[in-house]
Amino acid sequence: MPLWLYVTLSALGFSALIGAELRARGFRAGLHGKKRRRILRNFQFLAGALTASIALRLIWSQLFVHVSPIVEWGARPIANLIGCVLVAELIGYGLHYVKHKSSLLWKFHFQHHIEPRYDIWLVTHTHALEVMISGTAMGLALVALGFTPSSVEAYLLFYGLANTYQHSAFDYSLGWLDRIIVNPAYHRFHHAVGSDTNFGNTLTVWDVVFRTATWPKSRHRPNLEIGIGPGPEPYGFVEEMLYFTEPSASPSYGPEPTTATIPVYVP
């Protein structure tokens, strides 16, 4: 995929999603309002996320130059693309799962969960070091498995847009595709206090396979408490970035899942 096409499609997609999100008062409050610390934190994370994204793309381009694939797909572009998406999602699922189970890795992931508001600001709330390490590991695996640059870039474009879409404050739905593609109602359960469910990055397939899927009762936003609850995790960009240097303390994601009391609905 030419770089200009990738940038154009990304810009159009993100602009549409962000423009629609401006209808949410909570999202607008993250741009300007009375809570200056929260606004500053949002823009600091946004700058960090953009920097990490650009750096990671450069790293992936070098992987295609210096890493030799161990699998040859031949002239099968569709199979290559489908395989790339499924493998990338499997790797993403595994990485995401262990970040919630390891007290050390949680220190690099809680930033995405500590915010009690659910809107697309959450997409930017990531630890740059986590993004770089996880992304490099995934890129190395995809290149080694013979997935083409076009397939990888197509997945990256899909991931970026789908990840933004699923964090929206609104009740978006893709109809029957909600069975496959993570929508906001589905992903809200993952961000609920005490949740231990819905770890899929953009697809529900591996949640279904590993039985960690929890379906919302309807296509509308479930009424859940969002965040991680009381715990040792700090709030503030610098404090959150440096939290991994602190001595280990009991994380606040907790062992009790919310799935037992959630009514099941398959769209």
Image: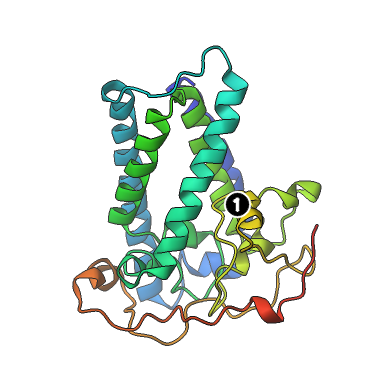
Report whether 171 appears left or right of 116.
right
Residue 241 seen by the camera:
yes
Residue 11 seen by the camera:
no
147 vs 176: above or below = above
Crowding at dot 1, Cα within 10 Å, few <14 / some 14-19 / many 20+, comes out as: many
Give the camera-side residue of 253 and 76: 76
Q: Position of residue 225 (x, y in %)?
A: 59, 80
Give the camera-side residue of 262 and 24: 262
Report whether 260 appears left or right of 47.
right
Residue at horizontal 80 percent and vertical 50 percent from the top? 175
Mark 1, residue position: 206
Q: Secondary structure at mark 1?
A: helix
Question: How are the colours assigned in the image?
Answer: rainbow
Report whether 69 appears left or right of 227.
left
224 vs 39: above or below = below
Q: Position of residue 143 (x, y in %)?
A: 39, 29
Amino acid type, callout 1: Trp
Quadrant holding the C terminus: bottom right
Give the camera-side residue of 71 and 196: 71
Residue at horizontal 50 percent and vertical 76 percent from the top? 227
Q: Position of residue 166 (x, y in %)?
A: 61, 56
Residue at horizontal 37 percent and vertical 29 percent from the top? 144
The number of numbered discs placed on residues in the rendered structure image is 1
Residue furthest top as drawn: 75
Residue at horizontal 74 percent and vertical 51 percent from the top? 179
Q: Position of residue 25 (x, y in %)?
A: 60, 69
